[in-house]
Image (cartoon, rainbow, N blue to C red):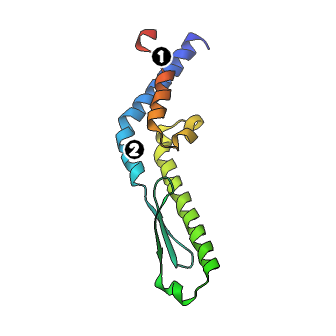
Amino acid sequence: MDIQALRARADELMNQFERMRSGVGGLQQRLKEVNVTVTSDDGFVTVTVGPRGHVAKVEFDPRLYRRPNSKELSATVTATIQRATEKALAEVEELLRPFVPDSQFQAYLDHDLTGIFGQLERELPREGDR
């Protein structure tokens, strides 16, 4: 890369870093607040998951006990958890998308903001190097 290209890349990284730094507080709060509730197609199972797809709550409609079938219930719970997890992860991705370059997006999905900033600082030129 020539000097102009290096400077352009450094400016790009600096802008990205500043954009992230200015929005990180709000972003972290919004990420923590992601909470998705999905109800199974039959309406008997409702699952709530958090931002990393962890199950926070499982609820069963009382009508479920009128037709007990443990295998069907297990399949319904599993499918509902999977749908809720996918929806929560999609919300997290949507929150992160404006802050993250496509080439680094997957790393950002791990919520490791300290590591992300460390990476950006390593890539940015030092003040005396400009």
Residue in the picture at 46% in, 28% down: 118
Characterize the local packing of mark 2: few (<14), some (14-19) or many (20 or more) Cα atoms within 10 angstroms: some
| Residue at image point 52% right, 53% down | 89
Q: Which residue is mark 1?
A: 125
Identified at 51% across, 16% down, the residue is 7
- Which element is circle 2 on? helix
Callout 1 secondary element: loop
Please say if 67 is above or below 84: below
Quarter of image, res 20: top left
Whether residue 94 sits left or right of residue 23 in the image: it is right
- Among numbered discs 2 and 1, the one appearing first in the sequence: 2
Q: Which of these two is toward me, 54 or 2?
A: 54
Residue 27's label in the rendered image is: 2
Residue 123 in percent (x, y) is at 51, 22
In which quadrant of the rendered image does the N terminus lie? top right
Query: Residue 130 appears at what percent x and percent y?
Result: 45, 11
The kind of residue tagged 1 is Pro
**In the image: residue 56, left or right of residue 41:** left
Q: CA distance from mark 2 to mark 1?
A: 26 Å
Q: Residue at x 38, y 33 (%)?
A: 21
